[in-house]
Image (cartoon, rainbow, N blue to C red):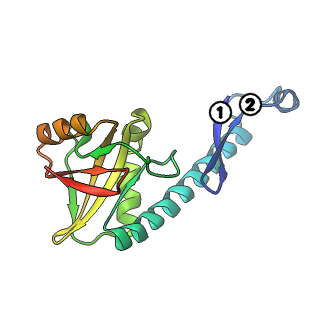
């Protein structure tokens, strides 16, 4: 069973039907049709990620921050976000564009998809924009502990949509 992108931020479970399996019999492994299918799926993912990056750029302009996970349509409504996941350093950029966010997502794709509690975070400040891998945790005390351990200045409260300074 595969997960495939079906549009509008939606995914679906997909299992090849008996008819599809029969119609593929005799195709060599790695055939043109299989290669084309992989290319189409990759193009759809890239388009989705670029569209998401554009939405995140607009959110950054409106709210001065965002948290994003490609397989989750919205931010959790409880818990806390803490920066510098897996010791990954924060990247500060003076000029942030949709392309900047898109490239950051692509560069960290394997880490995010391998860790279900990991998101990409972006915060606007006077020097530019910080892009970071952030960890979602349920409890405030755990978030504060992680924040102090990682040298963070603040954590983000998902329920109240506010910053808690450490």
- Quarter holding the N terminus? top right
Mark 1 vs mark 2: which is more N-terminal?
1
Q: Is residue 114 left or right of residue 91?
A: right
Compared with residue 67, is residue 57 higher up or lower down, i.e. above or below? below
Which element is circle 1 on?
strand
- For residue 62, which quarter of the picture? bottom left
For the residue pair 141 and 130, the one nearer the viewer reads as 141
Image point (39%, 44%), residue name: 78
Number of the label disc, if any, that sits on residue 37: none
- Image coordinates of residue 138 in percent, x first then y, are 34, 36
In the rendered image, is residue 98 in sight?
no
Residue placed under numbered mark 1 in the picture: 2
Give the residue drawn at x 85%, y 26%: 18
Check the image and report above or below for 64 versus 41: below
The disc placed on residue 15 is 2
Q: Is residue 18 above or below residue 121?
A: above
Q: Is residue 87 visible?
A: yes
Residue 56 horizontal/vertical position (percent):
42, 63
Q: Residue furthest front?
A: 160
């Amino acid at each position: 069973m595969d997960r495939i992108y079906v549009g509008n931020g939606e995914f679906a479970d997909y299992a090849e039907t008996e008819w599809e399996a029969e119609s593929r019999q005799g195709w060599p492994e790695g055939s043109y049709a299989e290669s084309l299918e992989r290319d189409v799926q990759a193009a759809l993912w890239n388009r989705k990620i670029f569209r998401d990056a554009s939405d995140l750029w607009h959110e950054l302009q409106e709210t001065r921050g965002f948290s994003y996970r490609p397989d989750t349509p919205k931010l959790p409504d409880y818990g806390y976000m803490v920066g510098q996941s897996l010791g990954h350093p924060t990247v500060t950029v003076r000029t942030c564009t949709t392309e900047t966010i898109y490239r950051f997502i692509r560069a960290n794709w394997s880490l995010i998809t391998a860790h279900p509690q990991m998101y990409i975070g972006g915060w606007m400040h006077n020097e530019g924009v910080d892009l970071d891998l952030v960890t979602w945790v349920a409890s405030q005390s755990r978030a504060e502990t992680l924040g102090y351990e990682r040298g963070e200045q603040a954590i983000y409260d998902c329920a109240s949509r506010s910053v808690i300074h450490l």
